[in-house]
Image (spheres, rainbow, N blue to C red):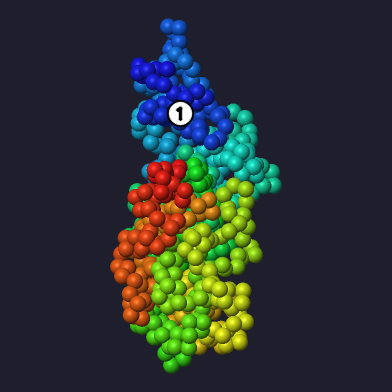
Amino acid sequence: MKINGVERDFPSGINALEACKMAGIYVPHFCYHPVLKVVGSCRMCKVEVVQGGRSRIEISCNLPICEGLEIWTNTQVVQKAQQMTLEFLLANHPLDCPICDDAGECELQNYYLEYGRHDSRLREPKNRKFKAKDIGRSIMLDSERCILCSRCVRFCAEVTKTNELGIFGMGSTERIDLTPGARLNNDYAGCVVDLCPVGALTDKDFRFKRRVWFLKSKNSICQGCARGCNVRIDFDENPFHGHKKTFQMRSHRTEATALQRIQRLKPRFNEAVNGYWMCDAGRYGYKATDSADRLKHSLIRRNDELVSTHLQDGVRIIASGLFDALKNGPTKAAIVVSPALTSEELFAIKVLFRDKLKLSNIDHRLPIDEEWYGDDLLRSPDPFPNRIGAEWIGLIPEAGGIDIKRLEEAVLSGKVDTLITFLVDPRILLSVAALNKLKRRYFILRDITEEMKPFVDAALPAAAWGEYDGLFTNFHCLTQRCEQALEPYGDARPVWKLVSDIAAALKKPLNLETHHNALKALNEGVQFYRGMTWDKVGSAGLMQDAVNAPVKQVG
């Protein structure tokens, strides 16, 4: 077929809009989405079709390609048709751009500047519809801004299959609204905001929070569960832009700090992992990075009081205590690690505590919260993002070692008197009696609550999500990159760095000065990560079975 006079080959079964996209030619559109049914309601994606010496205007999203088809996207007829479509779409659209959250990334706004540029000929008053309607836990609807593309309706009908939204009324009174008795509270409700091409659907969490042109972005992966959905972190570190306190999801334990650097998360397309979507638990999980209970500096117990101190003071206390514990044999200490750590961090722990200090009591198999659940769309029944990595690295007890299930008994009987945990609240492992019986209680944490502090002898601040680089392997054995967007808060450091500092204090150096060193050590020390360089993993991830074969990226 020909596009703009150039003959090209395309696979059968696609529409003209997708063919143009494959040819690098952009056709404006509102209602079309690659994974939703075609409805052709916006009429924006018009092209000129030439057949049999005659031409006509058609919408490209509903035009199947065929042998010999000829279309034009840049003729004056097409441009006039697109301009007329925009004029109708804008006829009743409110002039909300100065106060609309979508300003700066609104497709209607962008298309007007590129394809419209017409003066208003409307003399009649605009139709008035409801504004700022609360339709769910996290979503607001402004019906006046809606252009009836129906993406949100189709998402709820075809993807989540929960059918909370519908189109009601006729003619100029048509509107998107909740179906009777419904609320938009499904686990993927935030995706309708991503789909909305204008500012009709807005997120309460981001509403009136930041202008989008203030935001910087970084690609990363969600750490909410074992799937590892691809996301984009939008952040702003300028304290003079202020901070709006936003609603808290049930899983958010604490309020955000006065300066919240991460402003929102958006899903990033990866066909092999999450497609175009992400769940609300992951979308709003970023708040822990700047929560009020972040551990910013080392804590040590002095004269029965927990005091803040320099990072290296905390490192020396832990190294000294561990040295004393090991005088009575390596079985006296137990190490519990979270599968929320990166593979580089897990490997550093393994090298120090298993290979150099010969500890057998190391385990990562934490219990799963009874309230956590998976689904058939994206949410994994396993909430830990790197359990496969922990298993590949081998962080389980050696023969005769004590696992998490037997830790309480071992502490109460005196077999274990020293506990070190990494990103683990010890209260989920041990009773108060067992915690009080321990001689040494050392924790590497991202945050710390008041209720936990009585059981801490020393704590080191670990960098939170968004503050470090690292690899995670999801439950499909796809290894992906988590990328650093922000500098660590206070004295916080990536866990591999803290472990390296402890090792140096114990005269067992790991020589990990940079993330590159940590990744190289992982590559050389674990068979499943051999050959996985940062560049080879890339932004889409790398399957384990492709490591020693010609590298194939997934996504």
Is residue 279 visible from the viewing direction of this image?
yes
The residue that appears at 59% across and 82% down in the rendered structure is 410
Q: Is residue 115 above or below residue 223?
A: above
The residue that appears at 60% across and 41% down in the rendered structure is 159
The residue that appears at 31% across and 70% down in the rendered structure is 511
**Residue at which label 1 appears:** 18
Q: Is residue 480 above or below residue 54?
A: below
Q: 322 and 116: which one is in front? A: 322
Most extreme residue toward the top is 53
- Specify the quadrant that holds the N terminus: top left
The kind of residue on which mark 1 rests is Glu
Relative placement, left or right, of 275 versus 261 is right
Circle 1 packing at 10 Å, graded few (<14), some (14-19), many (20+), is: many
Q: Quadrant of residue 492?
A: bottom left
Query: Looking at the picture, how far across and down is residue 90, in whole percent?
Result: 45, 32
Most extreme residue toward the right is 181
Q: Secondary structure at mark 1?
A: helix
The residue that appears at 61% across and 87% down in the rendered structure is 413
Most extreme residue toward the front is 399
User: How many labels sit on residues?
Assistant: 1
Query: Looking at the picture, how far across and down is residue 54, in whole percent?
Result: 44, 8
Is residue 199 visible from the viewing direction of this image?
no
Q: 355 and 199: which one is in front? A: 355
Query: Looking at the picture, how far across and down is residue 299, in whole percent?
Result: 41, 81
